[in-house]
Amino acid sequence: MQQGAKANYTGKQFENVIAQQLDNLDIGYVEQHPFTSIYAHTAKMDFYIADRDLAIEAKFQGVGGTVDQKIPYVMHDLESHPAERGLLILGGAHFKKRTSIYDWAKQFAAKSDKQIDVIFLEELEDYLEQIEAKQAA
Amino acid sequence: MQQGAKAISNGKDKEYSVSECLTNLGIDFVKQHRFTSIYGNKRAQMGFYIPSLDIAIVVKSQEVSGSCDHKLPYAMLNLGAHPAKRKVLVMAGDHYTTRRPTVYHWAKKFAATLEKKLDVLYIDELEDYLEQTEARQAA
């Protein structure tokens, strides 16, 4: 399998894992939610959770590859999505090993005018529960 | 040829065009110039560096639809992180010129927000740009 095709394959699997977690938590969502990208064309956000007004992008990188080069684009797109909150979920060995990428994304989020969070997949359940608790309070 | 392999091949062609342009103008350059990326990678490589003009150049090429344009903000931020005085993003291919010029417009706008000066050009503007920069430096 070519590198690009392999990256898409693992990326899709990663999205399926997230969808499964959302299902387990009984959270309704839209997959491939259309919005206007920074390039002014119709793009698709991986997930949109309407009752939390949360847009989610998922990025997975195993070992090699160039998915990490798309992180700045993803962060800008999360900013341009009309949802109140944005969330980048990272997965795969590359992001765990090269924590500077996670750090860069966190710094970007901290400077943004919008509420954007960056987490690893394992943090998703806690993150969603916290948002729910805050909303209920 | 698979999409990814084709994109790499197109990119190499355009890099060759830039090499050729620099050579024709008699400008010495370094290819794959080492610098520290925005992610702190000290072994990152900038497409071209011209010591005499202190210019760093990145070439981004895309012919058809795909996700190469998703790497553009990263390329621009990395240009910003390069220590060169001048930074240039060179865009090439139908995707940027004809199919989706909004990407070029976004890059121009984004460049204006960066702390350091960064110029965004189409590949056919590069020769004039370099000649003008050389002339300004000589003046």
Image (cartoon, rainbow, N blue to C red):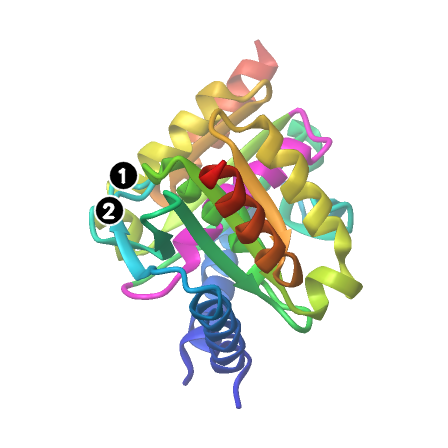
Q: Quote the CA–CA distance across marks 2 and 1.
A: 9 Å
Q: Amino acid at mark 2?
A: Asn
Residue farthest toward the top in the current orientation of the protein = A137
Front residue of B136/B54: it is B136
Q: Is residue A76 magenta?
A: yes
Around disc 1, counting alpha carbons within 10 Å, would you say few (fewer than 14), some (14 to 19), or many (20 or more)?
some
Chain for numbered disc 2 = B
Q: Which residues are magenta?
A: A63-84
Labels 2 & 1 near each other (Cβ < 8 A): yes
Q: Which structural element holds mark 2?
A: loop
Q: Nearer the viewer's eye, disc 2 or disc 1?
A: 2
Q: Residue at x 41, y 35 (%)?
A: A105
Which amino acid type is shown beneath numbered disc 1?
Ser
Q: Is residue A42 left or right of residue A87?
A: right
Q: Chain of mark 1?
A: A
Q: Is residue A106 above or below residue B46?
A: above
Please name the residue that numbered disc 2 is placed on: B41
Assign the magenta stretch its main secondary structure. Answer: helix
